[in-house]
Image: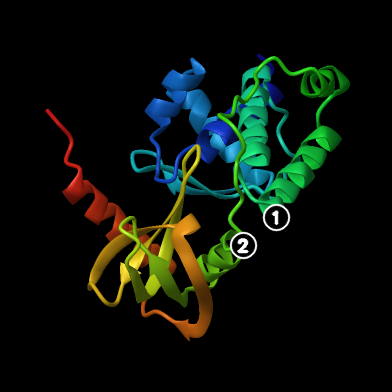
């Protein structure tokens, strides 16, 4: 492995960690010495890569926007294509269009031999029957991103209708059902709503308190309380 390849691999490893990672861990993953990791970190910092940390505490990549995009391996490309194909087959036209644009960007930066792998894929997505695209999904996604409250006229599985105001936080994509998860003001708790059973929806200009990340954290904690790990 050349030094250039090693530096790119080091940047990629740092990209995969959201929290500081020690030089010892990086050295083991790259099969190099800890001293070489220290030298490579300094070299990257001198080239302008924003790496924070120090020996003994660990290192965290803050920004590498000035670097050219790394090439994808064949396995990475397979994973990306499988995900993009799933989005194209199982989501609404807005996300399908986004997946097509993402694919075009990928094809623009990869070498020709990998581009041929995109044109002749061996990993395919299978669907069970026709997939129904709910028209409410683009508005719901926008509400999630902008922290807007959402008013719903909802009919449950017993065909009982109710009016709800929720703080949307997650959309769950299953094979044939989409679930909107959020904080329900009526129940004062997190609730799930099948998108295909939403009769009417209105996106409010009012935002819920706190940040989306705080609400998402609360939802994840709620899920763990409902579904404790067995052990």
Specify whether 84 is left or right of 155. Answer: right
Residue at coordinates 30% horizontally, 53% vertically from top-left?
A: 220
Residue 121 rendering spot, x and y as whole percentages: 74, 18
Residue 119 rendering spot, x and y as whole percentages: 82, 22
User: In this rendering, does residue 40 appear at all?
Assistant: no
Q: Which residue is the extreme one toward the left?
A: 231
CB within 8 Å, label 1 to label 2: yes
Q: Nearer the viewer, residue 157 or 222?
A: 157
Rendering quarter of residue 17:
top left
What is the secondary structure assignment of the residue under circle 1?
Answer: helix
Residue at coordinates 68% horizontally, 18% vertically from top-left?
A: 74
> Marks 1/2: CA distance?
7 Å
How many marks do you count on the picture?
A: 2
On the image, numbered disc 2 is attached to which residue?
138
Residue 199 rendering spot, x and y as whole percentages: 49, 68
Please say if 30 is above or below 168: above
The mark found on residue 15 in the picture is: none
Q: Quadrant of the C terminus?
A: top left
Q: Quadrant of the N terminus?
A: top right
Q: Nearer the viewer, residue 104 or 138?
A: 138
Please say if 93 is above or below 188: above
User: In this rendering, does residue 110 appear at all?
Assistant: yes
Residue 55 rendering spot, x and y as whole percentages: 39, 39
Specify whether 42 is left or right of 117. Answer: left
Label 1, residues with CA under 10 Å away: few <14, some 14-19, many ≥20: few
Label 2, residues with CA under 10 Å away: few <14, some 14-19, many ≥20: some
On the image, numbered disc 1 is attached to which residue?
94
Residue at coordinates 34% horizontally, 43% vertically from top-left?
A: 57
């Amino acid at each position: 492995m050349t030094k250039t390849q090693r530096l790119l691999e080091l940047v990629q490893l740092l990209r995969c960690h959201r929290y500081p990672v020690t030089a010892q861990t990086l050295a083991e993953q790259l099969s190099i010495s800890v001293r070489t990791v220290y030298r490579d970190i300094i070299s990257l910092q001198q080239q302008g890569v924003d790496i924070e940390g120090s020996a003994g505490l660990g290192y965290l990549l803050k920004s590498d926007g000035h670097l050219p995009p790394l090439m994808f391996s064949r396995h990475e490309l397979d994973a990306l294509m499988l995900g993009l194909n799933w989005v194209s087959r199982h989501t609404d036209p807005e996300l399908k269009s986004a997946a097509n644009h993402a694919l075009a960007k990928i094809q623009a930066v990869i070498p020709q031999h990998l581009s041929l792998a995109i044109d002749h894929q061996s990993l395919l997505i299978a669907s069970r029957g026709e997939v129904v695209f709910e028209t409410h999904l683009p508005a719901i996604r926008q509400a999630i991103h902008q922290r807007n409250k959402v008013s719903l006229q909802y009919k449950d599985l017993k065909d009982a209708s109710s009016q709800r105001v929720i703080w949307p936080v997650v959309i769950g994509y299953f094979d044939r059902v989409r679930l909107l998860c959020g904080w329900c003001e009526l129940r004062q708790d997190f609730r799930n709503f099948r998108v295909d059973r939403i009769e009417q929806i209105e996106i409010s200009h009012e935002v819920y308190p706190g940040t989306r990340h705080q609400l998402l954290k609360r939802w994840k904690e709620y899920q763990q309380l409902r579904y404790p790990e067995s052990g």
